Image (cartoon, rainbow, N blue to C red):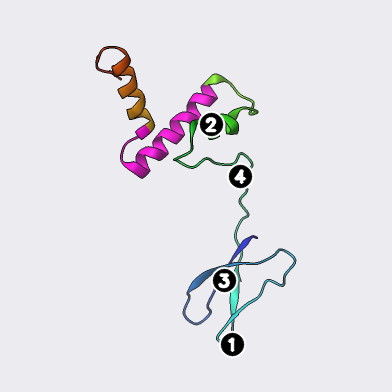
Amino acid sequence: MPIYLYQNPKTGEIKEVAQKINEAHLFYEDGIEWLRIFTVPQLNTEGTLKADCTDKQFSEFTKNKKGSIGDLWDRSKELSDKRKKVYGQDPVKEKYKKDWSKKRKNRRFIE
């Protein structure tokens, strides 16, 4: 269901209200009709991945997309940045570094 914004004419408070498209877009609270705030519709046709998606989810999300390997690397970098914001560091990248180092007799991974 789409979310619509309504503003209380007296207090200026704004609320998000989920309504069906075919419903009348009116919102009442305590006998007061709130004013609808019209916004520009936003549509994301690409979809998004959460920061904590698995490698399988990433593969499924990107397998039928058109683009170059560079586009895939860019998307991977975006997810890495999301994980860094959420967790303070990218746990996937840290695990890769640790595994890489272990495979190579504890050599340090240098970026």
Dots 4 and 3: beta carbons under 8 Å? no
Please state the extent of the stretch shown in magenta in the rendering. 70-91
Where is residue 52, by image quadrant?
top left
Q: Is residue 28 above or below residue 79?
A: below
Q: Where in the figure is residue 101, as x and y percent of width and height?
A: 29, 18
Q: Which residue is mark 1?
A: 31
Is residue 30 rendered magenta in the image?
no
Q: Which of the two discs, 2 and 4, labels the residue nearer the N terminus? A: 4
Instruction: Tell us which disc is closer to us: 3 or 2.
Output: 2
- Decide: is 84 above or below 64: below
Q: Is residue 9 above or below residue 65?
A: below
- Camera-nearest label, 2 or 4: 2
Q: What residue sits right under mark 4 in the picture?
A: 44
| Mark 1 residue type | Gly
Residue 78 lies in what quarter of the image? top left
- The amino acid type of the residue labelled 4 equals Asn
Amino acid tagged 3: Tyr
Q: Which residue is mark 2?
A: 56
CB contact under 8 Å: marks 1 and 2: no
